[in-house]
């Protein structure tokens, strides 16, 4: 039997000699894709489809960690980038497109009165934290969710190697949908918390008053409320989760879908706070790089002109409803559930008395990949996904869930794996 991933594995062997883990992004590495049953290198993408270097075609439900919202190689975005490329990508002076994109964000995002650009989400979240500390003259930060690789956040996780203890101590965790956990932090650190930063939603919907209560409590304690909208931005609504839920933060951070996969991020917020960007040091040689900003402007214009959000929401709703029915029909609901927003839904896998959730997840990935479905636990929907693509997803799930149900009953899951199961590692959410 031929190895479906032969070229990917050969390239991975080569890459690991010069690149730690063989990948630039943790979530694209062997820690997340089980070796022996996974592709590792893409050759190209078009619309909803990604092609690996072995020539395998996938319907992509990862979409580069939710950064591709319109679909790969969107013609409008590509044209805008090509036109800008003829003018230049970076100059010794600012380009007017910086102002144009900033004005567009102010037009679309409720809390945005001023804007500064970065390249990655971690740039934006770190900038928002620094400006909140400068504004409040306080040091501690309360966090809920995933907020990037910088010391101020990652020091609060199990991936804290290399972060000084003095930095770790300044980041405090609270629980989503548990307002008392945030109240306790403010009580234990009176007048010391500069900012509360959270993803307004990930796998679970906020309760009716949670976000409202977070905002009230934050302001009562004279702290800055920051929404990390890396994934929710331009997916839940054109104005992000803050528009969707009707709760306006003081600052917000955006990235990923802001430019359909081109590298740009943004800190936006109230003018009285954002003015301090003149005083703190938040400056990038490539902060005004024009190709990504051209992609951003084209993406944002398309979001306003076409029913992108509506389409993503409708198709994502079909995914949630159909997967729920399939799980019921295969009697798997005690082990697997689906939750989240239609644009970003999660398969939640529980441990059984015989197998860990990661062993079950490994089996699902192995079987879905061979059926041309690229996903590793979430459905990151794009405008390019068609009804036919969804039918292929459901057919694959039907077969894979059927197989899983049988092997769980016969207790033969490990024998069905063609690889070592995934190992417990850094958990970014939950």
Image (tube, rainbow, N blue to C red):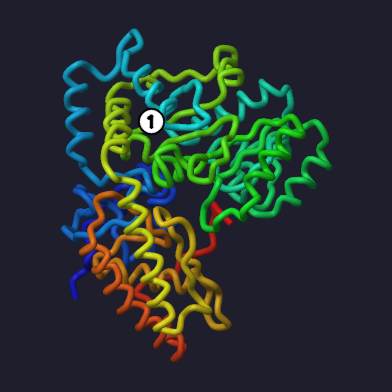
Q: Does residue 7 appear to the left or right of 99 in the view shown?
A: left
Q: Does residue 209 appear to the left or right of 344 in the view shown?
A: right
Quick check: 249 above or below 95? below
Q: Position of residue 298 (x, y in %)?
A: 27, 31
Q: Is residue 286 visible?
A: yes
Where, by quadrant of the figure, is residue 107 drawn? top left
Identity of the residue furthest to the bottom in this view = 410
Q: Position of residue 420 (x, y in %)?
A: 42, 70
Where, by quadrant of the figure, is residue 425 drawn? bottom right
Q: Pointer 1: what residue?
A: 264
Residue at image position (38%, 61%) is: 317
User: Which secondary structure lies at badge 1?
Assistant: loop
Residue nearest the viewer, comparing 391 with 209: 209
Viewport quadrant of the N terminus = bottom left
How many C-alpha atoms fall within 10 Å of the one at disc 1: few (<14), some, or many (≥20)?
Answer: many
Residue nearest the viewer, comparing 90 with 96: 96
Q: Position of residue 366 (x, y in %)?
A: 34, 70
Q: Does residue 241 appear to the left or right of 154 in the view shown?
A: left
Quick check: 16 above or below 168? below
Residue at image position (60%, 44%) is: 161
Residue nearest the viewer, comparing 107 with 142: 107
Q: Is residue 43 visible?
A: no
Q: Does residue 47 appear to the left or right of 375 in the view shown?
A: left
Residue at image position (34%, 74%) is: 418
Residue at image position (31%, 38%) is: 303
Q: Say how many tags the image has.
A: 1
Quick check: 355 above or below 339? below
Identity of the residue furthest to the top in this view = 93
Viewport quadrant of the C terminus = bottom right
Q: Position of residue 38 (x, y in %)?
A: 31, 63
């Amino acid at each position: 039997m031929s190895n479906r991933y032969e070229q990917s594995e050969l390239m991975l062997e080569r890459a690991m000699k010069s690149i730690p883990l063989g990948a630039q992004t943790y979530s694209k590495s062997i820690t997340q894709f089980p070796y022996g049953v996974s592709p590792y290198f893409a050759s190209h993408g078009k619309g909803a489809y990604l092609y690996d270097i072995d020539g395998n075609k996938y319907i992509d439900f990862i979409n580069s960690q939710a950064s591709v919202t319109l679909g790969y190689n969107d013609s409008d975005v590509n044209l805008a980038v090509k036109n800008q490329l003829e003018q230049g990508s970076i100059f010794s002076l600012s380009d007017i497109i910086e102002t144009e994109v900033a004005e567009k964000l102010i037009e679309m995002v409720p809390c945005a009165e001023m804007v500064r650009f970065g390249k990655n989400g971690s740039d934006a979240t770190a900038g928002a934290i620094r400006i909140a500390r400068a504004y409040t003259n306080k040091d501690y930060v309360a966090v809920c969710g995933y907020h990037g690789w910088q010391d101020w956040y990652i020091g609060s996780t199990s991936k804290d190697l290399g972060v000084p203890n003095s930095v770790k101590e300044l980041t405090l965790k609270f629980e989503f949908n548990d307002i008392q956990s945030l109240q306790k932090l403010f009580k234990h650190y009176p007048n010391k918390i500069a900012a509360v930063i959270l993803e307004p939603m990930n796998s679970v919907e906020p309760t009716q008053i949670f976000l409202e209560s977070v905002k009230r409590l934050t302001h009562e304690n004279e702290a800055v409320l920051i929404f990390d909208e890396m994934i929710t931005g331009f997916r839940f609504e054109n104005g992000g989760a803050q528009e969707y839920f009707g709760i306006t933060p003081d600052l917000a951070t955006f990235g990923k879908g802001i430019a359909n996969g081109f590298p740009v991020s943004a800190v936006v917020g109230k003018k009285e706070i954002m003015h301090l960007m003149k005083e703190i040091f938040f400056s990038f040689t490539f902060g005004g790089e024009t190709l990504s900003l051209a992609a951003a402007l084209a993406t944002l214009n398309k979001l306003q002109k076409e029913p992108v959000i509506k389409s993503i929401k409708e198709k994502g709703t079909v995914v949630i409803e159909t997967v729920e029915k399939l799980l019921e029909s295969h009697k798997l609901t005690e082990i697997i559930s689906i939750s989240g927003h239609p644009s970003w839904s999660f398969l939640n896998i529980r441990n059984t008395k015989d197998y860990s959730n990661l062993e079950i997840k490994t089996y699902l990935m192995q079987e879905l990949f061979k059926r041309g479905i690229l996903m590793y636990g979430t459905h990151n929907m794009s405008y390019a996904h068609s009804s036919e693509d969804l039918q292929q997803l459901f057919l694959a799930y039907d077969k894979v869930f059927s197989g899983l149900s049988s092997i769980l009953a016969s207790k033969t899951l490990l024998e069905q794996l063609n690889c070592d199961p995934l190992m417990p590692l850094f958990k970014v959410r939950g």
